[in-house]
Image: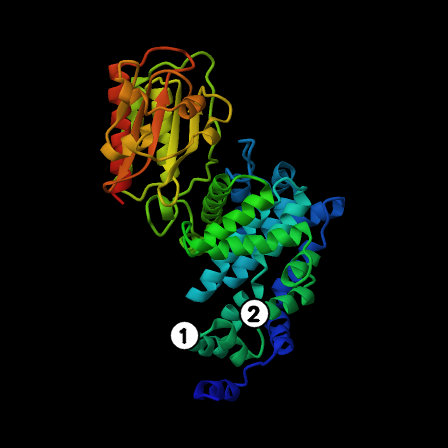
């Protein structure tokens, strides 16, 4: 036995699952336990429960403002109709969702009070991310099921989070031991506190009556769909910390693709988009709480620009953002306004997805191009995949815009030269051959503009635009304006 273990005994640190569950559940977090149990007991079918949920929210001014703010966010409010009351928020986005937000808000507030240490922040960030990923995995289920999965995934590491928050002297000892080269986390924890974090979570889940979904996910037995989503959500968030192009993520992507019955490329993009939405939701939390974990959640920026933080506005990839009645007309004033806003963004930390969407709007509504697509390189740079689409396009073109980057196709040619390109019928046969039948099947026949997005000398994706819908010819002025927009976005992104 080393000196540090002896010190832990002298400090009278609890030892074993029972002692730690008693300390955390009954001494350190009784108010949180009561709140979680009370909220879990409310049901959407009882009129009294709705009134009680409103009362719970209104009792806490900070919770009230947060619930209204989050209810009005793009992630939850799909109608565009804003609300200023809790009652209206429940009506708009649902009882189960508001109850879930209340529980998660109270849990995060309880854990991130005062000055949380780095290990606690990492666990909370991972838990919040896993909750969003798990909920997305059961996206077709009923609201009550989705929210139960969300809360269960959020609480999947509550034992470890509670320890780093309320563990007292034991935190100092475990932290010091874990810093020793070659130290094994599970062994260190069990040596010092006499239990594992997972057992601690299981004990708290039973003491707080957190439900069968969480208990099932924590046990080594056949999983229900909900429990399976909780465990897979945790695996996703844990793997993402290693990087979206890491071997661990490759394994997880295969699992998710099989789970959702989709191809692996689509599965990866869905995982990354969910991570972006998680960051956006953390940002909406406000008041110095969840934004503490915002930069710890891996997102699209981590492989698009190799930054440490995401800059997501919560936009949905692969969606057609608007269809015009007749063809859109050129708007010089709008072009100038968007270019001016983009130039101002170069002086501050930009929201990446806001930049991309502003450029797409400039190409479509400003220049008057029928359709525009943003496509980004996949991790490893082997493929280019459509992420955002605007204007008059074929159904599902975003998903069809998925091609390998090879020397014998237009994308390899584009990235090798890194200059904008106007493809038309005047091109020599060798250039026309770069646009294969497969590419034509996705984008259609006819001329188009295409240009790489180059950030610090490295192409990370491209913008594509055409007038296929209206069959109008492209013009030199449009090509010059197209180039201007693409150059501006590359300057903005390269500045950070």
Q: In the image, residue 161 lies at what x, y percent?
A: 53, 65
**Location of residue 458 (image quadrant):** top left
Secondary-structure class at tag 1: loop
**Which residue is labeled 1 in the image?**
182
Secondary-structure class at tag 2: helix
Q: Is residue 202 above or below residue 455?
A: below
Q: Is residue 127 above or below residue 400?
A: below
In the depicted view, which residue is nearer to us: 205 or 422? Answer: 422
- The residue lying at 35 percent from left, 26 percent from top is 464
- Left or right side of 53 for 416: left
Protein image colouring: rainbow
**Which residue is labeled 2 in the image?**
197
- The residue lying at 69 percent from left, 57 percent from top is 222
- N-terminal of the pair, mark 1 or mark 2, is 1
In the depicted view, which residue is nearer to us: 294 or 58? Answer: 294
Q: Is residue 75 above or below residue 292?
A: above
- Label 2 crowding class (10 Å Cα cut-off): few <14, some 14-19, many 20+? many
- Left or right side of 68 for 340: left
Q: Is residue 418 above or below residue 148?
A: above
Q: Is residue 57 visible?
A: no
Q: Calculate the distance from the C-alpha at mark 1 to the C-alpha at mark 2.
A: 19 Å
In the depicted view, which residue is nearer to us: 297 or 413? Answer: 413
User: Which of the numbered marks, if any, corresponds to residue 145?
Assistant: none
Q: In the image, residue 179 lies at what x, y percent?
A: 39, 74
**Location of residue 358 (image quadrant):** top left
In the depicted view, which residue is nearer to us: 409 or 249? Answer: 409
Which quarter shows the C terminus?
Answer: top left
Q: In the image, residue 150 lies at what x, y percent?
A: 60, 51
- Left or right side of 317 for 307: left
Q: Is residue 352 visible?
A: yes
């Amino acid at each position: 036995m080393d000196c540090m273990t002896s010190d832990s005994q002298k400090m009278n640190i609890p030892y074993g699952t029972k002692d730690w569950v008693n300390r955390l559940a009954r001494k350190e977090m009784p108010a949180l336990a009561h709140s979680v149990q009370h909220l879990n007991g409310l049901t959407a079918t009882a009129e009294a429960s709705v009134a009680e949920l409103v009362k719970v929210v209104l009792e806490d001014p900070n919770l009230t403002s947060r619930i209204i703010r989050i209810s009005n966010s793009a992630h939850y409010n799909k109608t565009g109709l804003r609300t200023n009351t809790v009652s209206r928020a429940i009506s708009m986005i649902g009882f189960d969702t508001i109850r879930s937000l209340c529980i998660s808000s109270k849990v995060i507030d309880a854990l991130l009070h005062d000055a949380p240490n780095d290990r606690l922040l990492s666990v909370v960030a991972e838990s919040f991310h896993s909750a969003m990923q798990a909920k997305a995995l059961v996206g077709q289920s009923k609201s009550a099921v989705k929210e139960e999965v969300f809360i269960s995934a959020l609480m999947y590491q509550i034992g470890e989070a509670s320890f780093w928050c309320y563990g007292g002297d034991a935190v100092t000892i475990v932290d010091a031991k874990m810093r020793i080269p070659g130290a094994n986390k599970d062994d260190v924890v069990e040596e010092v506190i006499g239990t594992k974090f997972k057992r601690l979570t299981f004990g708290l889940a039973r003491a707080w009556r957190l439900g069968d979904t969480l208990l099932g996910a924590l046990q080594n037995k056949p999983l229900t769909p909900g429990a399976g989503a909780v465990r897979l959500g945790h695996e996703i968030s844990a793997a993402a910390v290693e990087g979206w192009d890491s071997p661990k993520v490759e394994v997880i992507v295969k699992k998710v693709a099989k789970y959702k019955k989709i191809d692996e490329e689509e599965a990866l993009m869905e995982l990354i988009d969910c991570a972006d939405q998680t960051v956006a939701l953390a940002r909406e939390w406000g008041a110095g709480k969840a934004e503490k974990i915002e930069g710890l959640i891996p997102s699209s920026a981590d492989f698009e620009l190799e930054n440490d933080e995401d800059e997501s506005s919560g936009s949905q990839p692969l969606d057609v953002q608007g269809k015009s009645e007749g063809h859109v007309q050129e708007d010089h004033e709008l072009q100038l306004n968007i270019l001016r806003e983009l130039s101002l963004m170069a002086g501050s930390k930009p929201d990446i997805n806001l930049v991309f969407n502003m450029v797409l709007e400039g190409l479509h509504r400003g220049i008057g191009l029928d359709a525009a697509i943003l496509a980004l390189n996949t991790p490893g740079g082997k493929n280019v995949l459509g992420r955002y689409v605007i204007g008059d396009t074929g159904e599902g073109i975003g998903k069809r815009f998925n091609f390998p980057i090879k020397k014998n196709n237009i994308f390899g040619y584009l990235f090798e030269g890194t200059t904008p390109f106007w493809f038309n019928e005047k091109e020599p046969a060798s250039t026309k051959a770069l646009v294969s039948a497969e590419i034509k099947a996705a984008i259609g026949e006819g001329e188009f503009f295409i240009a790489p997005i180059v950030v610090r000398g490295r192409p990370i994706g491209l913008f594509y635009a055409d007038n296929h819908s209206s069959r109008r010819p492209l013009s030199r002025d449009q090509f010059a304006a197209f180039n201007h927009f693409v150059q501006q976005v590359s300057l903005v992104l390269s500045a950070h």
